Amino acid sequence: MSDNILKIDGLQVAYGGIKAVKGIDLEVNRGELVTLIGANGAGKTTTLKAITGTLPPCKVAGTISYQGQPLASNKSFKLVQQKLAMVPEGRGVFTRMTIHENLLMGAYTRNDKAGIEADIDGWYAVFPRLKERSAQLAGTLSGGEQQMLAMARALMCHPTLLLLDEPSMGLAPIMVEKIFEVIRDVSQRGITVLLVEQNARLALQAAHRAYVMESGLITMSGDARAMLDDPRVQAAYLGE
């Protein structure tokens, strides 16, 4: 049995005459934390949306397999039942629901009531600020608190694969530090993670392997820590 959790072969995405993704190959193996870094507009978020079937109308070619099965025919809302969860760019919390209700929504595919409540208590322990505000509407939270909630909600389904799209975007440095601490912890728990992130240094420090995306193409791939010392990566993404 293959260790591939996610395998992308020749993915192309075009909006009219504009090619956002130009034929990329990418794979994430069981237990890995893999990061996809690159500048704004490189095609990173488009790649994640292609995986989850949440792209606007466009032309898509290539194959995407999850645990050996093609994803193309699946509706995006069914992915959580298959233990594939995504924390989207912009967090996507249910603003008119409380924190507690958001977490319950993350577990909607489950029916083990005691286990769900135990998991909620577990994430409240990781994010004490959420526990303090559990009855507060999610739309009234700060950006960092919403990011905590979005991550905890996604993890409530016990995902096999967790997709994270720009989790540090717009957050204060102390909050970024907390979010990456949790990302590393999630990886250590054995959850497979694909992380799209503009903060290349933090992403490479946390990840096992990395891909660099430029103008819709994968231009580099390899060991994440080694990329920290690569002059091309330093010049383009690390400000060195």
Image: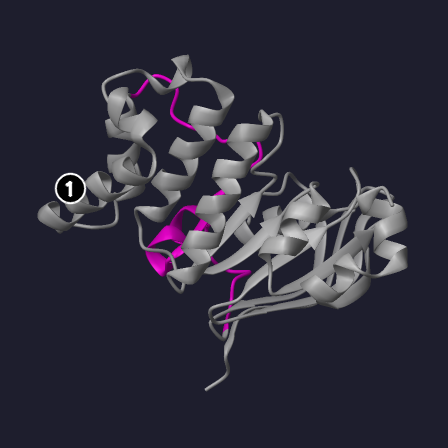
Q: Give residue 210's quadrant in the image.
A: bottom right
Q: Residue furthest bottom?
A: 1
Q: Is residue 28 above or below residue 125?
A: below
- Of 8 and 129, the residue lying toward us: 129
Dot 1: within a 10 Å radius of its alpha carbon, few (fewer than 14), some, or many (20 or more) residues? Answer: some
Picture residue at 51% right of the left edge, 30% below the top: 175
Residue 102, position in %: x, y?
30, 30
Residue 187, position in %: x, y?
45, 59
Q: Residue furthest left?
A: 114
The N terminus sits in image quarter: bottom left
Picture residue at 48% right of the left edge, 49% below the top: 183
Q: Secondary structure at mark 1?
A: helix
Left or right of 212, for residue 115: left
Q: Residue furthest top?
A: 140
Left or right of 220, for residue 54: left
Picture residue at 49% right of the left edge, 39% below the top: 179
Query: Does 86 appear in magenta?
Result: yes
Q: Amino acid at mark 1?
A: Glu
Query: Does 30 appear in magenta?
Result: no
Q: Is residue 160 visible?
A: no
Q: Is residue 85 above or below residue 191?
A: above
Q: Give residue 39's quadrant in the image.
A: top right
Picture residue at 42% right of the left edge, 33% below the top: 148
Residue placed under numbered mark 1 in the picture:
117
- Of 44 and 63, the residue lying toward us: 44
- Of 10 and 44, the residue lying toward us: 44
Residue 38, position in %: x, y?
77, 47
Which span is picked out in magenta? 69-97
Residue 15, position in %: x, y?
78, 42
The C terminus sits in image quarter: top right
Q: Is residue 8 above or below residue 181?
A: below
